[in-house]
Image: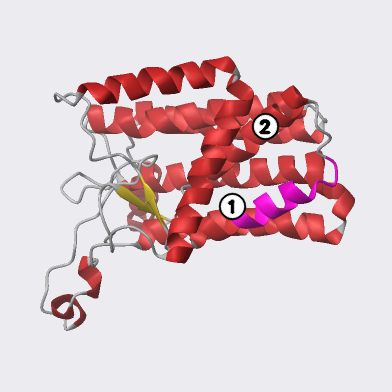
Amino acid sequence: MWPKKRTKKLRLRMGVHIYVLPNLLTTANMFFGYVAIILAINGNYIWSAYAIVAAALFDLLDGRVARLTHSTSKFGAEYDSLSDLISFGLAPSLLLFLWALEPFGRLGWLASFFFVACGALRLARFNVQVAVFEKGYFQGLPIPMAAGIVASSVLAFHELEIDASRNYALLAITFLLGFVMVSNFRYRSFKDVDLRQRLPFTYLVAAVFLFAVVAMHPEVMLFVMFMSYALLGAIFGFLRLGKDPKRPLFMSPQYAAGTGEEPPYDEDDLHEAIEEDEPRS
């Protein structure tokens, strides 16, 4: 028989408490990512793209629900990142390979691997960063947006009846998305826009115009909008246009010398926040 002390430690490990609701939503995110992989293997690329979109919706919900119900935790944040790697890294990379890049041979599967590897690096970098530049910007393209570009490209090519097999534009897009995910390019997150406050009337006019443009041809226009977002961030990053980013706290001389306080965590748009004052679950 095991010693009582060891048995007690095992019970404590097995009895970890977690917040159920946000983690169920994260599980739904991972489920649809897995479904997207199965559909892509079976050659059903359109529904595979829709499954990635469904995963993105649940990924958006889990963090919001966790913050609204005050149930954020380190466990939830790590679980969310692992689910994101499946739904927005592995699923879209496999979809790209089977749908368009397989005729390229070794170059095709290396491009797909480059996409998923950069997505994993993007998630890992976010998890270990103790500071970010500004609340209103992402550092690098978020992996759900990269997956959204892949999914919308499948729908757009199908709508326009364009043959995706051995398409050099899609090969270039695959490498571009991987690169901008791990880059330091600043992408606008719009977190600093508070829709609960009064805003200029032009904001509403712009929103209505944008809605009308997308409604004309949703599959194509969403791809154009998402791709433009990725390209503009890359162009501005290469040419160093726009305002200089604020210096992160961990780069300050006080922090480097060990005299400054450790900067607080910031929250990514599609991740649960990690709050130090919350109980670890």
- Which residue matches tag 1? 177
How far, Cα to Cα, is label 1 from label 2?
19 Å
| Label 2 residue SS | helix
* Number of numbered discs on residues: 2
The answer, for residue 189, to whether it is visible in the render is: yes
Q: Which region is colored magenta?
A: 165-177
The answer, for residue 69, to whether it is visible in the render is: no
Count residues near mark 1 (Cα–Cα under 10 Å), then give few for <14, some for 14-19, many for 20+.
Answer: many
* Residue type, numbered disc 1: Leu
Image: 73 above or below 2: above
* Residue type, numbered disc 2: Ala
Instruction: Based on the picture, tell me whether residue 174 belongs to the magenta stretch.
Output: yes
Taking depth in this image into account, of 110 and 172 the one nearest to the observer is 172
Q: Main secondary structure of the magenta part?
A: helix
Residue 85: where, in percent of width, then height?
A: 55, 47
Residue 16: where, in percent of width, then height?
A: 34, 42
Assign the C terminus to one quadrant of the image: top left
Asked whether, in this view, residue 226 is left or right of residue 73, the answer is right
